[in-house]
Amino acid sequence: MERVIVAMQDPDMGVKMRNQRLLITVIPHAMTGNDVIEWLIQKYNITEEEARHLGGLLVQYGYIYPLRDPRSLLLRSDDSPYRFQTPYFWTSSRWPASELDYAIYLAKKNIRKQGELVDYEKENYSILHKRINHTWDFVVMQAREQLRASKQRRKADRIVLECQEQAYWLINKPCPGAFDVLDLGPERCNVLSSRVALIEHSRRALGRNRVKSSICLESFMKYSEQYLHHDPIMSGCLPSNPWISDDTAHWTINTDMVGTPTRLRVERWSFSFMELLNDSMGRREFMIYLEKEFSAENLCFWVACEDLRHGESSKIILKVEEVYKNFLAPGAARWVNIDSKTMERTLEGIKRPHRFIMDDAQMHIYFLMKKDSYPRYLKSELYKNMLAKAIVPQETKKSVFPFMRRQRHSSPSPAMVTQATEDDGKAKGAGPTGTSSTTNSQI
Amino acid sequence: IGSHNFKEICFFERNKSCKIYSLSFFFLLPASALTTGIYMIFSTNPEMATQEVQPNETLTNLKAESDTLKTKLEDERAKLHDVELHQVAEKVDGLGQFIMKTRRTLKGHGNKVLCMDWCKDKRRIVSSSQDGKVIVWDAFTTNKEHAVTMPCTWVMACAYAPSGCAVACGGLDNKCSVYPLSLDKNENLAAKKKSVAMHTNYLSACSFTNSDMQILTSSGDGTCALWDVESGQLLQSFHGHTADVLCLDLAPSETGNTFVSGGCDKKANVWDMRSGQCIQSFETHESDINSVRYYPSGDAFASGSDDATCRLYDLRADREVAIYSKESIIFGASSVDFSLSGRLLFGGYNDYTINVWDVLKGTRVSILFGHENRVSTLRLSPDGTAFCTGSWDHTLRIWA
């Protein structure tokens, strides 16, 4: 902010300053709200809305203060006069506003014009009166002295100094309930640096394999292009974006186990192996395909390993035993074909089972499926049929009466859905059905 | 050593060629003054005589060595940097006008909203605020479904479990607690609370990993940690940041084993969840990193910082590849997220606005007004149809 303020005060390129009228007094070196906004628009090449917002923040943080209506820290885009706050009072100087200074300020106001203090100021005044009662004579004396000194100033200077001080206190002792500019959230402390760890890390990093920027950046282009039509914010979504139209059809036709999936969804399975596996319907279809190819044990193994990795700590030993029995033991019902080295390592590791013991084997099978079964699945009749019968929903026509809002129906909470299926004795995978119901269930 | 009045950090350095170990102590006194403690050099080889080295000498050597390595690393990184992102992006079409509006305003928090997360059902969210309230909403209908009052203020972190059956939250209580979501109206959610994580300073962020069983946390104590929910056991801890860690994000990769964190030390670190090692580190920001988020492909991540910029870091090129900044943006970015295709980057800022950036071209596409105080949190919905922002103005907004 200070960078902006300094630029604004530049004698050549800064905001146009001139004498402004405030009722009958002429204030030197002031500017209009309009001038500030114009300058911001010019300098930063932004719209009027943004300039008004930015200028408004400069006032809220006390770097510019209003001369007319000094209690309201707003930037008006008209000929209201404003001035730059003196650096002495800048928010960043952050020296704590002392109680004594505040008391003197309030006392001055009180003496100058009875009833000029507003409610919260009156309250603060009486609280301070109680708290620093022992120095109250000093407070009143100081206040009187300062008032006398200011009476000897020119009216224009007096007004300026009063407004300056007022703006400072409006920010440091804001009205309760008003926005407190100085509120920055919990303190962030700093811990000491460890040079040695840094050295170790840098040494390791030097040995890293890096890829040329041109190749990496090219991949961003490709990714964005590939997913362009799948990005609802970029390309809209069919039949309509539920948040805009209040119609949840888009969610209904994309539920986990819907009868016929949408075309976009099936297309997405061809983008990467991970996309296929992450979609529960895609995974189910892939499983059907693998069963035809008699290699379904690979996917089952992968699923079991995922369950091991992400499951409860207490079940690890049990799960490792299960995996061994079903997939790795010689003569196992669903024996998976892993290379001998990995198999040896895994079997050795099973003696001391932990969460990540199947990682190597799991990766081997994952890449096997990715390089072999997955591309063949995409070329298969099964996938092609899926794509052919996939639906492309019609775009919902905009309502004739744009002001009629649809009723927004609630949906069953995932917590409830999972509870229900658990009662059936079967654990459901992640992801609720999310179908909308017409009853507004009050939960 | 080990007294609760001060912390000590000690580390070993091994000089491989002559098997000399140096052991250094730094004492942090309560008044935050720093004194270097005793330096001792001792050897495992009984034939070598023990030497005493002046503390200043060792410290200067260490500094010189780490600085040299840092420069070397920058040179290595620069060697393969043959083109800038906006150059590659020249052939891509520019984006037209973007009209995004607030579609829902969620009112109900009595104080600053600090964090929010989406449920996998694409419409429910959990949000937490300064006064200790954690609320679960159906953002589509704007109905509140659950509310919990935490025993602490400044609940800076909250997360929705993948199953949709629980939420995790924490803040100034230094803990991360998991609340199972019960649908029985008479049940007091707070009663079922389970304390999972324990840090020695405030909890800044938390996230479930692929299941309800594990939680990843980051804290003001400078560490991140992985916890087992069931037992509350610490599975792995991640040391390397030299100041408060403020944010983290899990990688959407095939092998699903890494995450990135950002902190007050201006560093963004990428970690291996299995080993606890920091595998990559980036330090180009000029101030605290408030938010980190992976690019949808997992090959890069974006960061938002108090230095008023957002940046993009490519993991394979191992460098920063873009800076999103504008002279008129002078307030810090508190929270960032990508659109589904990764083409747009949404940034919530401390000047109450949201700036929308074209990730490829590096230009700002749009600025969104609406909040009346800082935007503290921003997340895209799971299906990319909208994003949600939470603000110090006590409200949450859904934009689409």
Image: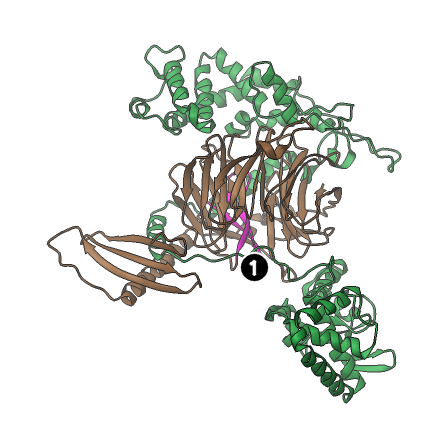
Q: Is residue B163 left or right of residue A442?
A: left
Q: Is the N terminus of chain B in the top left, top right, bottom left or bottom right quadrant?
A: bottom left
Q: Residues within 10 Å of mark 1 (few under 14, many from 20)?
A: some
* Residue nearest the observer in this picture, B249 or A439: A439
Q: In x, y percent, where is residue A311? A: 47, 26
Where is residue B393 drawn, in percent x and y? Answer: 71, 51
Q: Is residue B223 above or below residue A410?
A: below
* Chain A painted colour: green
Chain letter, disc 1 residue: B
Q: Quadrant of the C terminus of chain B?
A: top right
Q: Relative to A227, say whether B326 is above or below.
A: below
Residue occupying the far bottom of the picture: A152
Question: At label 1, which amino acid type do we have?
Answer: Asp
Is residue B298 magenta-colored? yes
- Is residue B70 visible from the viewing direction of this image? yes
Element under disc 1? loop
Residue A184 belongs to magenta span: no
Q: Is residue B9 above or below residue B58?
A: above
Q: What range is drawn magenta here?
A: B288-317
Taking the image as drawn, is residue A16 in sight?
no
On screen, residue A82 versus residue B328, left or right, reads right
**Colouring chosen for the image of the structure:** by chain
Chain ID for brown = B
Foreground of the two, B136 or A33: B136
Q: Position of residue B57 (x, y in %)?
A: 27, 66
- Residue identifier under label 1: B307
Q: Nearer the viewer, residue B159 or A241?
A: B159
Q: Position of residue B270 (x, y in %)?
A: 45, 45
